Amino acid sequence: MRLSESFHSYFFLHGEWVLLAGALIAMILLDPYENSQTLCLFEQAGITFCPGEGFGRSIALMARGEWIESFQMHPLGIPGTAIITHRIYSIYKRNKSINS
């Protein structure tokens, strides 16, 4: 197997879940009370409305057990965490069946 095929195979098996898990961990470790620089492309372009505003902070609040504040910050934070976690698990199951 050539190196490019090996990399493609490895990335197919592990790339998505590594990126998703890293993003989820980064959002959990956020300080939800700190107003820091935004990553929102809408706000950086000068548009005041950002549909994802507060999503990461919502996940951080949920991880700290502050469920009501999490929902108030962004209503899709809690379901979003469940969806991301389910996707990581489904990739794990896929990889396990491929390697078996």
Image: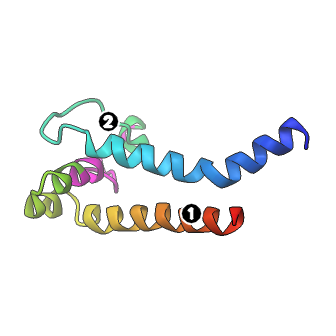
How dense is the environment of label 2, judged by Cα within 10 Å: few (below 14), some, or many (20 and up)? few
Q: Secondary structure at mark 2?
A: loop
What amino acid is found at the position of numbered circle 2 in the picture?
Answer: Thr
* Residue 1, percent from left and from top: 91, 44
* Residue 41, percent from left and from top: 43, 41
* Residue 46, percent from left and from top: 37, 38
Left-right relation of 35 to 13: left
Q: Is residue 5 magenta?
A: no
Vertical side of 15 occupied by 44: above or below: above
Residue placed most toward the observer, 61 or 39: 61
Residue at 33%, 61% in the rendered image = 81
Disc 2 marks which residue?
38
Q: First in sequence: mark 1 or mark 2?
A: 2
The image's mark for residue 91 is 1
Left-right relation of 93 to 72: right
Residue at 18%, 37% in the rendered image = 31
* Residue 29, percent from left and from top: 26, 39
Vertical side of 86 occupied by 27: above or below: above
**Please, what is the dominant secondary structure of the magenta stretch?**
loop
Q: Quadrant of residue 33?
A: top left
What amino acid is found at the position of numbered circle 1 in the picture?
Answer: Ile
Q: Secondary structure at mark 1?
A: helix
- Residues rendered magenta in the picture: 46-59
Q: How many marks?
A: 2
